[in-house]
């Protein structure tokens, strides 16, 4: 396979399967765990186990991919995903379910490696557009994952979604092994075997990379706080059931897929990565702030769409800025470390959201979930300030910075 488009297609499929698998467990896993008599606390720890494991695994996979290449890391980690889902599907105890979630979390740390693969085969000018393709996979995964989980468990039993996810991962592993070429040339591998993962700051524009990492952490923490309590917010404030919640989440995912998969490249060319990141942070922060103020279905849909738009503008542009700020030989480590920061945020955000939500329980109906949503808006608002300090050249449009050919 020599076509860049085909290579991106396989990477797109890799991320899509990861995200479908992640989405599948959202409606199914808590109920499945209760069949093993899991308490509410154990259920929460089960959800957190994935991000906890991913936090430690993401930089490891990125470092390993810089040393041995992207293809073997993607292949091995996706096999790990298949094993994790198989164990979930055939789990005979709560302990086995925890083990399966940890294995899946470790394997799921490969997203930074997939992003590094995209960075390897794209130019700096194409970087944000290519990262947008990964963002589209995220969006579609969150659209189809929960839907597949709900339908499969109802038709074929609660074990079936996990077995389907395992089969999809195995197919993806075969595709990677047989038709995906390596993106990292041999001469660029293994040059930093003994270096600490934090050496990435010495092989990058350290200030820019630090700014992007801090922005990414604030963004993911705030966004995960919203996703944690979104269904409860809809139920207690608007009496919307799981079906309506799924429909709204599908809308959010589709907006993300359209923007990140089709529009982001043109927007970056016109406005520049940093300006787009700032605009996305502003829209996301304002939408999170406005969400608990929604007075009806119309404003609820409007603010939810605003959240989707803001997040979709911010995520791929941050990935593009991070990638452009790091030396070519350190892409795997840099994006793996960034993914690790995101995993830590997905671990902290839900816990913080639950704590703040408890402050709103028992208060007036219109105040329900205001505390966690406004805290999330404040975190994203802080990221606005961080994006304003990104270099000027990343604020200019690609067209304006390209050399003239006339």
Image (cartoon, rainbow, N blue to C red):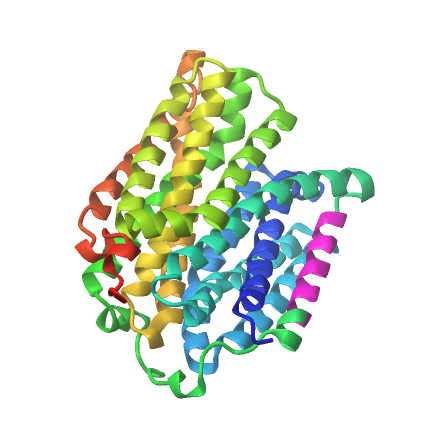
Considering every residue shown, the one lying at the far right of the view is 156
Residue 64 at x, y = what percent? Answer: 45, 76
Q: What residue is drawn where x is 57% and y is 42%?
A: 43
| Above or below for 51 versus 194 | above
Report the front residue among 167 and 304.
Answer: 304
Is residue 402 shown left or right of residue 149? Answer: left
Residue 109 at x, y = what percent? Answer: 49, 62
Q: How many marks?
A: 0
Range drawn in magenta? 160-174
| Above or below for 224 versus 231 | below
The answer to which quarter of the image holds residue 31 is: top right
Q: What residue is drawn where x is 66% and y is 76%?
A: 178
Considering the whole magenta stretch, tell me its main secondary structure: helix
| Above or below for 134 versus 377 | below
Residue 114 at x, y = what percent? Answer: 49, 65
Residue 388 in sight from this viewpoint: yes
Residue 91 in sight from this viewpoint: no
Residue 330 at x, y = what percent? Answer: 34, 73
Report the front residue among 319 and 30.
Answer: 319
Considering every residue shown, the one lying at the far bottom of the view is 187
Q: In which quadrant will I find the C terminus? A: bottom left
Membership of 209 in magenta stretch: no
Q: What residue is drawn where x is 55% and y is 39%?
A: 254
Considering every residue shown, the one lying at the far front of the view is 406
Q: In which quadrant will I find the N terminus? A: bottom right
Membership of 167 in magenta stretch: yes
Q: What residue is drawn where x is 63% and y is 27%?
A: 242
Is residue 404 shown left or right of residue 165? Answer: left
């Amino acid at each position: 396979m020599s076509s860049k488009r085909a290579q991106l297609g396989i990477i797109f499929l890799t991320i899509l399967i990861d995200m479908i698998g992640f989405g599948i467990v959202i409606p199914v896993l808590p109920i499945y765990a209760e069949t093993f008599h899991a308490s509410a606390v154990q259920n929460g720890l089960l959800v957190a186990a994935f991000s906890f494991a991913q936090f430690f695994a993401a930089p490891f996979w990125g470092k390993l991919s810089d040393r041995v290449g992207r293809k073997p890391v993607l292949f091995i980690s996706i096999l790990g995903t298949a094993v994790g889902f198989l164990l979930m599907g055939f789990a005979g105890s709560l302990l086995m379910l925890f083990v399966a979630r940890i294995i899946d979390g470790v394997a799921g740390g490969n997203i930074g490696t997939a992003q590094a693969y995209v960075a390897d085969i794209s130019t700096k000018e194409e970087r944000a557009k290519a990262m947008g393709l990964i963002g589209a996979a995220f969006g579609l995964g969150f659209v189809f994952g929960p839907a597949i989980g709900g339908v499969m468990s109802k038709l074929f039993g609660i074990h079936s979604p996990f077995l389907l996810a395992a089969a999809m991962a195995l197919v993806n592993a075969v595709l990677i092994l047989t038709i995906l070429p390596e993106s990292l040339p041999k001469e660029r591998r293994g040059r930093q075997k003994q270096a600490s993962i934090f050496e990435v700051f010495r092989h990058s524009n350290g200030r820019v990379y630090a700014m992007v990492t801090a922005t990414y952490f604030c963004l993911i923490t705030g966004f995960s706080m919203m996703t944690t309590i979104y269904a409860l917010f809809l139920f207690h404030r608007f009496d919307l059931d799981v079906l309506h919640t799924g429909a709204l989440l599908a809308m959010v995912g589709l907006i993300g897929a359209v923007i990140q998969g089709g529009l982001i490249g043109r927007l970056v060319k016109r406005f520049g990565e940093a300006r787009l990141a700032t605009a996305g942070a502003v829209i996301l922060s304002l939408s999170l702030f406005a969400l608990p103020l929604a007075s009806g279905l119309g404003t609820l849909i409007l603010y939810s769409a605003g959240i989707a738009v803001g997040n979709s503008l911010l995520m791929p542009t941050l990935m593009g800025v991070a990638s452009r700020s790091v030396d070519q030989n350190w892409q795997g480590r840099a994006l793996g470390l960034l993914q690790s920061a995101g995993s830590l945020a997905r671990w902290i955000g839900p816990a913080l959201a639950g704590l703040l939500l408890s402050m709103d329980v028992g208060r007036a109906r219109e105040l329900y979930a205001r505390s966690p949503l406004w805290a999330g808006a404040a975190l994203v608002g802080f990221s606005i300030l961080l994006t304003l300090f990104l270099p000027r050249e990343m604020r200019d449009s690609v067209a304006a910075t390209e050399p003239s050919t006339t």
